[in-house]
Structures are given as structure tokens and as C-alpha cells.
Image (cartoon, helix red, strand yellow):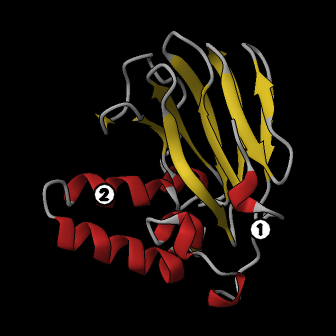
Amino acid sequence: MNKKIAIPPDGGDSFDFGGLGVHWKIEGEETGKRFSVVHHPLAPRALAAPLHYHHNEDEYSYVAQGTLGALPGDEAVIAGRGSRVFKPRGQWHTFWNAGDATRLIIEVISPAGFESYFREVVAARGDLGKFAEINKDARSKWTLAACPLYASGSASRFRASETKERRPAEAGALKL
């Protein structure tokens, strides 16, 4: 286990997915897989991720800059600078930049491992087949589940009977 004593602001790898950035700060290997830390800059009014949940990971978001909109479970919240938002494992959630300026959150993922998902997506950049394979594998590798409402690409094709996964009540009815 390699422990970092101090991490400079520009320390760690980073990548911008075109609105959502990932800046790896503390890797799971450095913490005995107990947790990892990534920073997520997010462009104004951008959605960070579609509705999803994690079977094994809890996510703790600290709003370092800007305004975070989040849907942890069935309740939409707006969190300003200095706020924390908890997204526990097994709970459907999504998050977005609710402001007109770049937003930055510091995300603690526990246990570690899911930060590797972003690395795999970066490595597959430009290869849609590989990207689809990564997301298919994510269900078993990181036990990530995406809401069929979004995965199908069309809310009109969504039927509750098409999945055995838990989903929020009236997922298609939320208007933000």
C-alpha cells in the first residue's frame, strides 16, 4: 500500500469526457481498497450520469465549487458550496450541475474500485463497441446498474416488467 502524504492540486491523472471531468486523487491501491477519491468538475447545467445505483459502493460528494443538483432516491436536492450529499449503495441516484458556472465535487467512493470504471472508459475512447462492452461488464465487475428508462434510450419503451432491478417510484415522471 503506497500512502500519499500530500497531493498537490494538479496531482493525479485527469480526463474530461466533454462536460464531466474525472481527476483521480487517491486510488484504491493506496488505501487497501477501503476507499478512493476522485474530483468531478462538471460544466454548467450538465448531467453527470444517468440514473443508476451501485450494489457495493457508497458515494460521498462534497461540493467544493458551484451548485450540485442530485437525486438520491426519490428526493431531489440542491447542494451549495460546502455541502455534502450521500449516495448509499443500492439507492438509485443521479447528479448534475445545477448552476451557470463550473461545479466541482470531491467524491469519496467506498469501498474503492469503481474509480477504475472511468479509466476503462477513457481507454476505450472512440471505440463504441468497447464502450458498450465495458458498460455491459460493469454490471458484474462493479455491480453497477443503470435504469432501463435510460439504458433503453426511450422512456416510452420502458415497462416495469422488463427488469427485476429496483427503481425509484415513478422514475419517468420526474421533471427537473
Residue 127 position, x and y percent, is 14, 63
Choose the circle earlier in sequence order: 2 or 1. Answer: 1
> Who is closer to the viewer here, 97 or 111?
97
Q: Amino acid at mark 1?
A: Gly
Q: Are marks 2 and 1 in contact (CB under 8 Å)?
A: no
Residue 92 visible in the current orientation: no
* Residue closest to the far left: 126
**Disc 2/disc 1 C-alpha distance (Å):** 23 Å
Mark 1: few/some/many CA within 10 Å (<14, 14-19, 20+): some
Residue tagged 2: 121
> Who is closer to the viewer here, 95 or 173?
173
Residue 13 position, x and y percent, is 32, 36
> Who is closer to the viewer here, 15 or 33?
15
Q: Which mark is residue 90?
A: 1
Residue 101 position, x and y percent, is 51, 9
**Left or right, 79 with reference to 115:** right
**Left or right, 172 with reference to 126:** right
Q: Amino acid at mark 2?
A: Val
Q: Residue at x 48, y 24 (%)?
A: 7
Q: Which mark is residue 107?
A: none
Q: Residue at x 48, y 66 (%)?
A: 154
**Left or right, 15 with reference to 144:** left
User: In terms of secondary structure, where does tag 2 sit?
Assistant: helix
In the figure, 60 relative to 145: above or below? Answer: above
In the figure, 151 relative to 159: above or below? Answer: above
